[in-house]
Every structure is written in C-alpha cells, then in structure tokens.
Amino acid sequence: MTSRNVRTSFGPRSGAAVLAVAGTLLMAGCSGGAPADPGTGSPTPSQSASPSVPPTPTPNAVYKPADASGPAQNVPVPVLPEVAKTETKEGAEAFTKYWFSVLSYAYETGDTVELSGLSKPECNFCQGLVTDIEAAWAEDKWISGGQIEIPAATAKPASGASMQVVLQVLQKELTIHNQDGSPYQEKTAATNAGSVAMVDFAGTGWVVSDLGLIR
C-alpha cells in the first residue's frame, strides 16, 4: 500500500474502522466519537465486571479457535522477533507487527497484560482497546474471530526518536458470545484497512505512543 497523500487522524478512540470489533462496544468510531455502526447499540459494561480468565495453553496442545461452544483453546503466544528489539527501521516494523499480534491474542484470550505494557498510557486508543476487550470478556462472555494479520508495514522516521509505521490491517469477522454461546450483539464484518502507528524506542524496547486511521 502507498502512503502518498495520506491523511492520518490521531486522538482518543480514533480510527475505529481499522480494527473490526463487535458493534460499538469494543471501539468508538472515527475521530469526533461517531460510532462505527450507527445501528448498533453501545452497552456500558458494569463497573464491577471483571474479565474472564482465559484458559492456560498446555505444551504441544492443539489450537482450537473459539466458536459458539466456547472460547479458543491453546492460542499460540506471540513471540517478539529479535529484530524487533533493535532501534532500526526494520526493528520498528517488526515490533509494530508484533504489537498487532499481541492485540489479536488479546481478542482470542481476554489477556490484555502484554498489550497494555507495550502501549504508552497517553495512547488513548491503545488503552481504550485494553478496556473494551476486558469488557467483552467480562461476566463469562468470550470473543470468537477477530484475528488480525499485517501483510505490510513500512516505517519512516518521525519527530524526535519516533518512527511512523504505515500498515495494512486485516481482521476477521468477530462475535462476542454470552455465557450460553448466543451472540451478545450483532457480529462485526471482516475488514481490510490501513493504519498508522507512532512507536518510540524507550531504552528497553519499542512502545506504541499513538495509533490512527489512514483517511
């Protein structure tokens, strides 16, 4: 994909269309707060709700995607490539791909610890994802689908020590399930869109400082 004449939008919960999530529970809309799907409600999770504990993968166990019968099992844990630990263009690209694989893992398992740790607190969009994924897994709900792939990522220097990484983001259809397996709300269609991530090398490694939608 090309980034020529690309406009990006950064800010709280901007660029929601980049990452498909069920209705408006997991993501607000583009900048300005407009919902991604005006026809879908946006229920507010209980403040006391806590995310379900994802099953722990067992060695050599077979991966089983989630469906209406239950959550995914033995989801492979993303591994940070060695090049992603370097303060280079290639390192920024590899790290950003890794970040999205961690996001994909969070959708499938409800485990947001690594995702939160790889995102700066001031990245409102990043931290919003953490909060919303936890809400989707609260009260014994779970997510099926939503897996993310990054076919292309291109980094270039930005201000200071930051890198701007332009990505193509593919995400599969996603459904949130109630305890009985029924849909919590309307499923979200698969998407193929572009995004821009700002990443900073913070001494011990890269971290995402902002995320936006290519417009």
Image: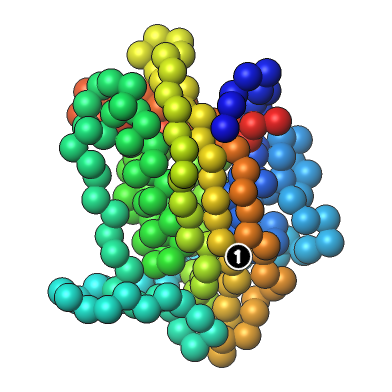
Q: Residue at x 34, y 40 (%)?
A: 118
- Quadrant of residue 30 in the image? top right
Q: Residue at x 46, y 51 (%)?
A: 149
Return the x and y of residue 68 as percentages of the image width and height.
54, 84
Disc 1 element: loop
Return the x and y of residue 152 as percentages of the image width and height.
46, 38
Q: Judge whether 43 appears above or below 184 on screen.
A: above
Return the x and y of residue 85 as percentages of the image width and height.
22, 32
Q: Judge whether 173 appears above or below 80 on screen.
A: below
Tell me: 93 left or right of 122: left
- Give whichever of 4, 201 is nearer the camera: 4
- Quadrant of residue 104 in the image? bottom left
Tell me: 123 left or right of 61: right
Q: Residue at x 49, y 88 (%)?
A: 69
Q: Residue at x 22, y 33 (%)?
A: 83
Q: Residue furthest right?
A: 39
Question: Considering the image in quadrants, where does the C terminus appear?
Answer: top right
Q: Residue furthest front?
A: 1
- Quadrant of residue 33 in the image? top right
For disc 1, the neighbor class at 10 Å (few under 14, some 14 to 19, many from 20) is some
Question: Considering the image in quadrants, where does the N terminus appear?
Answer: top right
Whether residue 120 can be seen here: no
Give the residue type at disc 1: Glu
Q: Which residue is mark 1?
A: 173
Whether residue 63 can be seen here: yes
Tell me: 83 left or right of 18: left
- Give whichever of 32, 173 is nearer the camera: 173
Return the x and y of residue 32 as percentages of the image width and height.
76, 35
Q: How many marks?
A: 1
Tell me: 153 left or right of 68: left
